[in-house]
């Protein structure tokens, strides 16, 4: 009860500042959550077209205030599609209390709000992992460690998965850890310094929890390796095992994990969920709280992962790739379909051609084996002008759910995740509606099916991962 009372008093102490304006004109519009030493509020930035942002306030400790501000300034110079952006930081005062503040992107949801209700599917986990690895590899390459990888710091911003960036620390510097080590932190936390290997350990703990809703069992004071939860699907068991090695030098790096993830993988096992889980999965998770050390902070780029419906996988996703423009594309005997969009703005429309050798985009090829060509009769990938590709940072991902009638024709389609760009979403939808599948029967009866076509647009190529999700 004493702990509960203390938490209530702490919330009341921060919440009283709702409505106040801090230096820079940022109004504390709504209290979102707090830790022992920080709080986060909803605010707005921009005068002409105000946009939602999050503002984090922390107590200004004279001994390290300037160090914290310098770290935020360094983090603000980093640019990556899977990192929360920091916009402004400084000192402020509310009443007679000196504070530091940082204004950052507002995130609508985080992974820690999903896991109490359901685990992620293998597809969702892979999407989350790819985005996290991309961000971590970037940070480690720039000489930073994240230091706080955990579900609360893996968040969604406008359908894009991002990691927090307000706690970044240059490698080798003290990580600012206070009190007992957290459950996601590695054995070497006692040294006080964070490292890429520490991030990998925390990522392994997060992965295990995401897939099973349980953390690995281990004792910080003993030397045994953690005991992993059962029923971890491939390749995640192997990845988590190599993340959770007690010796930091024995752990895989973010680059190692990414390389393993992109090897040819077996099909994920079918996921079965109750109706209540599926209904809950469709809910939109609005951020009500924050974890210690982060208020609002950060898929796959371009894919909303945290409330996607669980899917029963009917085979491994297979990447079909359309490369970007090439000087002299090889000619085929088939005549390609015509009709490319004119790229004037991201909302422009057009009819994408067939994936069989468009004049301006080079050859189309299957980049991974195993696709049952009897299932998919005709694949269409969008034709994307290079001028449009040049606007892409990282990857733009769009998922389209198509309804296939017994004859194999697509008779309906809707976005499973539209991604951040209406232009690329439109191209993906137009292409998806023109796919053709083999007629199907179940128990001797003509059967309709559902597929999800996951389009991934990059600067040099377009890929699509077709996955059957229902009979």
Image: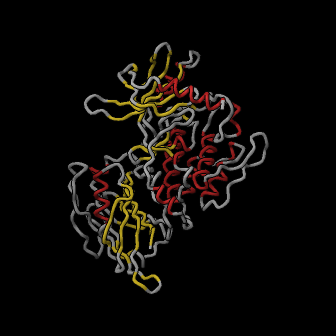
- The answer to whether residue 330 is seen in the rendering is no
- State how many labels appear: 0
Above or below 306: residue 248: above
Color theme of the render? secondary structure
Q: Quadrant of the C terminus?
A: bottom left
- Where is residue 212, by image quadrant? bottom right
Could you tell me if residue 75 is visible in this image?
yes
Give the quarter of the image for residue 319.
bottom left
Q: Residue at x 38, y 59 (%)?
A: 416
Name the foreground residue: 128 vs 402.
Answer: 402
Give the vertical position of 404 relative to 204 (above or below): below
Quadrant (top left, top right, bottom left, bottom right) of the N terminus: top right
Whether residue 54 sits left or right of residue 1 in the image: it is left
Q: Position of residue 104 (x, y in %)?
A: 42, 32
- Residue 136 is situated, as x and y percent measured from the top left of the image, at 53, 42
Please state which of residues 207 and 389 is positioned toward the viewer in this rendering: 207
Q: Nearer the viewer, residue 43 or 125?
A: 43
Give the residue at the far bottom of this rendering: 444
Figure quadrant of residue 31: top left
Q: Position of residue 397 (x, y in %)?
A: 39, 54
Nearer to me, 396 or 93: 93
Please report the residue visible at 53 percent of the width from the left and 28 percent of the height from the top.
Answer: 11
Q: Which residue is painted at 31% across and 30% down in the image?
A: 46
Q: Residue furthest front?
A: 1
Percent coordinates x, y for residue 258 in the rendering: 54, 52
């Amino acid at each position: 009860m004493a702990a509960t009372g203390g938490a209530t008093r702490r919330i009341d102490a921060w919440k009283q500042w709702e409505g106040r304006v801090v230096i820079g004109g940022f109004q504390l519009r709504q209290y979102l959550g707090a830790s022992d030493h920080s709080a986060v509020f909803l605010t707005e930035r921009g005068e002409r077209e105000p946009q939602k942002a999050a503002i984090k306030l922390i107590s200004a400790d004279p001994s390290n205030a300037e160090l914290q501000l310098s770290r935020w300034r360094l983090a603000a110079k980093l640019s990556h599609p899977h990192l929360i952006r920091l916009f402004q930081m400084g000192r402020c005062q509310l009443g007679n209390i000196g504070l530091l503040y940082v204004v950052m992107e507002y995130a609508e949801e985080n992974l820690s709000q999903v896991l109490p209700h359901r685990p992620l599917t293998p597809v969702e986990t892979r999407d989350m992992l790819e985005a996290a690895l991309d961000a971590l590899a970037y940070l480690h390459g720039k000489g930073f460690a994240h230091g706080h990888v955990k579900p609360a710091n893996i968040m969604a911003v406008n359908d894009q998965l991002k990691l927090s960036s307000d706690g970044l620390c240059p490698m080798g510097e003290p990580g600012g850890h206070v009190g007992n080590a957290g459950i996601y932190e590695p054995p070497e936390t006692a040294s006080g310094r964070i490292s890429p290997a520490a991030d990998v350990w925390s990522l392994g703990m997060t992965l295990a929890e995401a897939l099973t809703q349980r953390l690995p069992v281990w004792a910080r004071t003993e030397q045994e390796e953690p005991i992993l939860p059962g029923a971890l699907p491939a390749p995640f068991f192997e990845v988590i095992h190599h993340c959770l090695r007690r010796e930091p030098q024995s752990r895989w790096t973010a680059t190692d994990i990414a390389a393993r993830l992109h090897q040819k993988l077996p099909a994920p096992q079918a996921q079965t969920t109750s109706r209540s889980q599926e209904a809950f999965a469709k809910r939109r998770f609005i951020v009500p709280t924050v974890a210690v050390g982060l208020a609002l902070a950060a898929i796959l780029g371009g894919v909303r992962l945290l409330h996607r419906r669980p899917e029963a996988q009917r085979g491994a996703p297979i990447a079909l790739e359309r490369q970007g423009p090439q000087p002299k594309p090889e000619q085929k005997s088939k005549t390609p379909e015509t009709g490319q969009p004119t790229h004037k703005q991201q909302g422009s429309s057009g009819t994408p051609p067939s994936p069989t050798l468009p004049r301006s985009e080079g050859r189309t090829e299957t980049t991974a084996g195993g696709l049952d060509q009897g299932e998919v009769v005709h694949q269409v990938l969008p034709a994307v002008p290079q001028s449009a590709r040049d606007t892409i940072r990282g990857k733009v991902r769009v998922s389209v759910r198509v309804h296939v009638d017994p004859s194999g024709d697509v008779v309906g389609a809707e976005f499973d995740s539209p991604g951040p760009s209406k232009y690329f979403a439109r191209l993906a939808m137009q292409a998806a509606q023109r796919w053709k599948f083999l007629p199907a029967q179940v128990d001797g009866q003509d059967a309709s099916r559902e597929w999800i076509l996951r389009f991934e647009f990059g600067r040099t190529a377009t890929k699509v991962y077709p996955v059957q999700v229902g009979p």
